[in-house]
Amino acid sequence: MRPLSDHGLLRVWELGQDQHPVERAVTLLAAACPEMSGEELKGISLGERDSLLLTLRELTFGPRLAGYTECPRCRGGLEFSLVVEDLRPPAGERTLGRERTLAMDDFLVRYRLPDSRDLAAAASCEDVPGARALLIRRCVLEAGRGETEVEAETLPDAVIEAVGRHVARDDVMPEVELDLRCPECGHRWPMLLDIAAFFWTEIAVRAKRLLSEVHTLAVAYGWREADILDMSPRRREAYLEMVT
């Protein structure tokens, strides 16, 4: 994996403008992992995808994540800071392989961890129940109760919910839930960290800043975009200070 250069970041930003968030995540990784095909990247589990995105984000922007959100109660602003390494589970707790087995209430379910193709298919559904049913059909490989085979759609809700909890917990990178507290009113609430969305927001901000810098220097000196982007950030900043 290689970090996104300024050239690469602008290319990814341009490509991702009209893409669905699921496709954007694959586009990001494809730019950084040329050794893997698009289909290979779509086929890795969502946890593995997010782990790779977190690594790419660290390589591109550094180890610290600075975020902002609003309190759902009073709408007050809340800034928070995270360190990449703190978001990763300890190496010994990472479970390898995509297939899993769950035994519960006489049911035995063999299933696989969802990937980007599953998420894209679910996103096309009209409602949450439809998306849930589609994911069950796609990810449950085999189910039975005793000697009797059971269709995935007929599994009890408790079993399906247990599978969902195991998926969220056992992937290479489990879901990251932040415990936030509003400094204004003291309200506490949980928030899932979507690293793909977080990273994309940072990329969009950085891309617009780069375009502004290119515009300023091109107007001032007549330089080409490629030449400006090839400069080190420090040299580019020095020229911008002279212009402004």
Image (cartoon, rainbow, N blue to C red):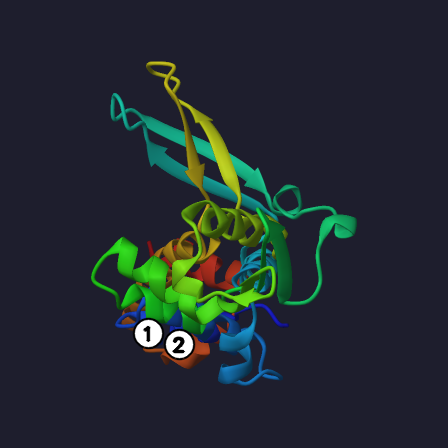
Is disc 1 surrounded by few (<14), some (14 to 19) or many (20+) residues within 10 Å? few
Q: Quadrant of residue 125?
A: bottom left
Quarter that holds the N terminus: bottom right
Task: Report, in whole angstroms, how far the alpha carbon at label 1 lies from the one at label 2.
Answer: 5 Å
Question: Which residue is drawn at the image coordinates 66% and 46% (left, top)?
Answer: 85
Label tally: 2
In the rendered image, the residue lying farthest to the front is 147
The amino acid beneath tag 2 is Arg
In the picture shown, does residue 60 fall above or below 19? above
In the picture shown, does residue 80 fall above or below 47? above
Residue 243 pos. (x, y %): 35, 58
The amino acid beneath tag 1 is Glu
- The residue nearer to you, when weighing 194 against 94, is 94
Is disc 2 surrounded by few (<14), some (14 to 19) or many (20+) residues within 10 Å? some
- The reply to whether discs 1 and 2 touch (Cβ–Cβ < 8 Å) is yes
Quickly name the residue at label 2.
11
Report if residue 104 is visible in the image.
Answer: yes
Side of 217 where 7 appears, left or right: right
Question: Which residue is drawn at the image coordinates 49% and 29% (left, top)?
Answer: 179
- The residue nearer to you, when weighing 206 against 48, is 48
Residue 100 pos. (x, y %): 63, 62
* Residue 181, label in figure: none
User: Helix or strand or loop: what does disc 2 sit on?
Assistant: helix
User: Helix or strand or loop: what does disc 1 sit on?
Assistant: helix
In the rendered image, the residue lying farthest to the left is 126
Question: Which residue is drawn at the image coordinates 61% and 55% (left, top)?
Answer: 102
- The residue nearer to you, when weighing 70 against 50, is 50
In the picture shown, does residue 39 fall above or below 167? below
Quickly name the residue at label 1.
14
